[in-house]
Image (cartoon, rainbow, N blue to C red):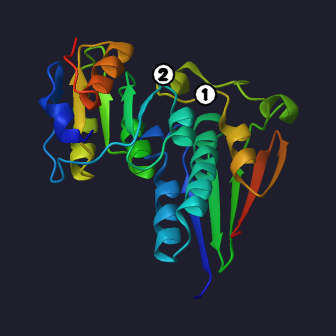
Amino acid sequence: MSEYLKEYPIERNDIGNAGTIASLTKRTLKKRGFSPEFIKRVTIGVYEAEINVVIHSYGGKAIIHVGDDLCEVTFIDRGPGIPNIEDAMQAGFSTASPYAIENGFGAGMGLPNIKAVSDEMSLESSEDGTTLNMRFYKH
Amino acid sequence: MNTKEIGNHEGFTQINAVQNNERSINKLFASDLLSNVMGQTNEHDCLLTMLNNINVIGVASLNDLSCVIFTQGVQVKQELIDKATELDIPLFSTSYSTVEAIVALTRIDANETVL
């Protein structure tokens, strides 16, 4: 099957549409016959990353690449960056706004969940933006 | 347990009309944190929550939950009801607290008298 490569814009604070990219990715993986376990892992990772860009950043984009045996997902935002990645990786650590918390987000579980479900994860951040890359391999 | 039994249960009211009104339920799961719901629920689970925003329906759809129950008399927003109906996800409301609702629902399977 041919490779799937899509780019999706993400708007700041667009909580109403948060989860759309995860939903579209899930549908693509299902169509391509990936296992429910694989689809679940990718969906959780994409959802958490999508929410992070919506509630923490000035906006950005997601790039979804699906091959025969893997799914690679990259989220790139336009800042303001993560001041301390070590803190952000701790379960329960959150800098979410009251608006995000009122909407059920900001539990401080996003990055720990992403690390738990992905096979490889890299995170780079500065004031100019954050780039998160996740790889999921079909086992 | 299935969603039809919840609708027939005293204290629980179904608040939208769906095509598949007899979905089986594997497990009850209560949380008001969506990351928690996303990471911990599976297909055919039932979510109990007081969280009243559209992303609850998004997560329910993503994880193929059987239904969502809004506890403590939450007045569910119309946009949630419309979205859930479009996605064929049954919604229920109850004046029970989340814990009371779980106790009541676990008694369905045990065939006991409810609260």
Q: Kindly state the secondary structure of the residue where label 1 is placed.
A: loop
Q: CA distance from mark 2 to mark 1?
A: 9 Å
- Crowdedness of circle 1 by 10 Å Cα count: few (<14), some, many (20+)? many
- Asked if A90 appears above or below A111 in the picture, the reply is above
Same chain letter for marks 2 and 1:
yes
What kind of residue is marked 1?
Gly
Would residue A82 be found to the left or right of residue A78 on screen?
right
Residue that protrudes farthest toward the bottom in the picture: A1
Give the percent coordinates (x, y) of residue A123.
Answer: 82, 48
Q: Is residue A90 above or below residue A24?
A: above
Chain of the residue under the numbered disc 1 shown in the image:
A
Horizontal side, residue B52 vs residue A87: left or right: left
Query: x%, y% of residue B52?
Result: 35, 26
Against A98, residue A86 (above or below) is below
Chain of the residue that carries numbered disc 2 in the rendered image: A
Q: Are marks 2 and 1 in contact (CB under 8 Å)?
A: no
Towards the viewer: A112 or B82: A112
Quarter of the image where one finds residue B13: top left
Rendered image quadrant of residue B60: top left
Count the numbered circles shown: 2
Q: Which residue is mark 2?
A: A102
**Amino acid type, callout 2:** Glu
B44 vs A101, nearest the viewer: B44
Looking at the image, residue B100 sits to the left or right of residue A59; the answer is left
Residue A67 rendering spot, x and y as whole percentages: 66, 78
Question: Residue tagged by mark 1?
Answer: A106
- Which residue is located at x 38 percent, y 15 percent? B99
Question: Which quarter of the rendered picture does the N terminus of chain B lie within?
Answer: top left
Disc 2 crowd rating (10 Å Cα; few below 14, some 14-19, many 20+) is some
